[in-house]
Amino acid sequence: MLILQEKYPESRVKTNPEDSPSSQFISGARHTFPLIVGAIPFGIIFGTLAATAGLSFGATMGMSLFVFAGSAQFISISLVAAGTAWPMIVLTTFVVNLRHMLYGAAMVPFYRTLSQPWKIILAFGLTDETFAVAINRYHQKDGFANKQYYNLGSMLFMYANWNLCTFIGLTAGKAFPEISGWGLDFAMPATFIGMVIPYLVSKPMWASVITAGTVSILAGGLPHKLGLMVAALCGVAAGMLSERFLVSQESVKI
């Protein structure tokens, strides 16, 4: 038994009612609720703008059901409305969502022991909000069981909300044409800032955020939103260097 525990640390987790699949599922959904509130207007506005851009009801709902990526969907409808060729639409949305490769890399240690169906489901639902909630919970040292159900609860709550809000935008959005003028230019950055702030607990984290923010401003003029990916990579590099040199030097002093 001791050998199994050393090989599979997950077997050391506590067994209590709060670790049951249903409890973890509900907990993941509950912890995602604050971010759900911020995502509601985006889904409604997407449905409204998609209809305005000429997408059919089925095509718009299909995007939310099978793409499930807010930034990619918003960019897609703007390119569709502009008459952009589909290869360019695919390339642009691919580049914009390259950040999800970083999300996936961060989740590998937690997904490694899961079955293939679990990996596919959770990877599909790895949105910005679910990643922020799940990675924060996974890094806590209480060794809770059924982590995949916590992740699933967050993901399905976001998924249901996004598709419901898309439907509302498609059906009721036409009755409120001013909805497209809501302050998304402020709301979207505010949402992401709220997701990042809880992680600013160490020098490497601060180095990553400050570097990524600065580079994103300087590289904002790059085509196809490449500045976002450059900023993300620079932020990761700054965090790694900071952790290697600053943290290691502090450890030596201690």
Image (cartoon, rainbow, N blue to C red):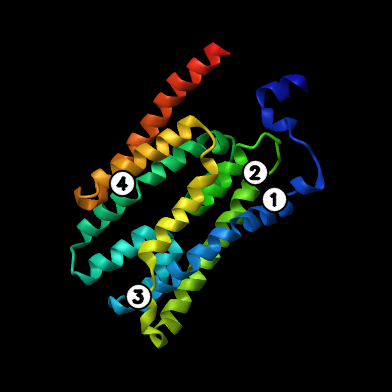
Mark 1 vs 2, N-terminal side: 1
Farthest residue in the bottom direction? 175
Q: Nearer the viewer, residue 241 or 139?
A: 241
Mark 4 and mark 3 in contact? Answer it, CB < 8 Å. no
How many neighbours does mark 4 have within 10 angstroms: few (below 14), some (14-19), or many (20 or more)?
many
Q: Which numbered mark, 4 or 2, is in the foreground of this view?
A: 4
Q: Which residue is mark 2?
A: 147
Q: Secondary structure at mark 1?
A: helix
Residue 13's place in the image compared with 176, above or below, is above
Instruction: Kindly report the distance in space between the C-alpha atoms of the residues bearing marks 4 and 3.
Output: 25 Å
From mark 4 to mark 1, how far is it between C-alphas?
33 Å
Where is mark 3, residue-wise?
A: 181
Please identify the quadrant where the N terminus is shown: top right
Disc 1 + disc 2, Cβ < 8 Å: yes
- Residue under the image location 60 percent in, 60 percent down: 33
Query: Where residue 143 sits in the image (x, y, percent)?
Result: 70, 35
Per the image, label 2 sits on a secondary structure element best described as helix
Q: Residue at x 65, y 43 (%)?
A: 147
| Mark 4 vs 1, N-terminal side | 1
Figure quadrant of residue 36 = bottom right
The extreme top residue here reads: 252
Give the amino acid at mark 1: Gln
Structural distance between the alpha carbons of marks 1 and 2: 7 Å
> For mark 3, does the 10 Å Cα neighbourhood hold few (<14), some (14 to 19), or many (20 or more) residues?
few
Residue 110, picture quadrant: top right
Q: Which residue is mark 4?
A: 228
Left or right, 127 with reference to 56: right
Q: Distance between the Cα atoms at labels 4 and 2?
A: 30 Å
Q: Which residue is mark 1?
A: 24
Check disc 4 and report its element: helix, strand or loop.
helix
Q: Residues within 10 Å of mark 1 (few under 14, many from 20)?
A: many
Residue 116 can be seen in this image: no
